Image: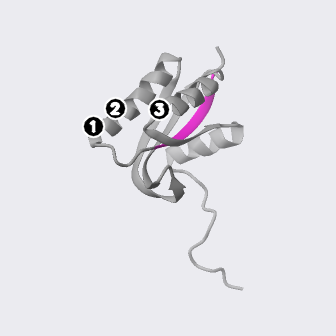
Amino acid sequence: MKTNFYEVTFIINPVLEEEQVKEVKEGFESFISERGAEIDEVDEWGIKRLAYEINGKNSGYYVNAFFHAPGSIVSDLERYFKLQENIIRDIVLKYDNKMLKHRELQKKGKLPVIFSETPEEE
């Protein structure tokens, strides 16, 4: 079965206790694993200020994950997020070949330098 590479970021209600946040994260991991996803990496970014208020909240607990999965998982995952009362926002990205190459360079620590800290002399 053909799989795609995905990145998902979701924001958890910031008023939850540490154990509740862990349950939400583990629930997400179980959900995608049960549907044939292979998790590559899960990063917890912690509580960050939101750019704008969402459901009366000014901050949220951010979680970012990378995984391989069949394409059918996207609609299931979007529905899952809508049904989770403690997840206040989410985004799912499907990586194309260029993004996959960038991800591999990122993992190897070999990203090209794009910006220079010192101005070039003329």
Q: Compared with residue 22, is residue 79 higher up or lower down, i.e. above or below? A: above
Q: Horizontal placement of 12 versus 118: left or right?
A: left
Range drawn in magenta: 3-11
Pointer 3 residue: 84
Label 1 belongs to which residue? 19
Instruction: Give the vertical position of 87 relative to 62 (above or below).
Output: above
Cα separation between marks 2 and 1: 6 Å
Quarter the C terminus occupies: bottom right
Q: Which numbered tag is attached to residue 23?
A: 2
Asked if the stretch drawn in magenta spans residue 100, the answer is: no
Nearest to viewer (mark 3 / mark 2):
3
Residue 93, image quadrant? top right
Quarter holding the N terminus?
A: top right
Q: How many marks?
A: 3
The kind of residue on which mark 3 rests is Gln
Residue 33 in the image: state x and y as whole percent. 47, 21
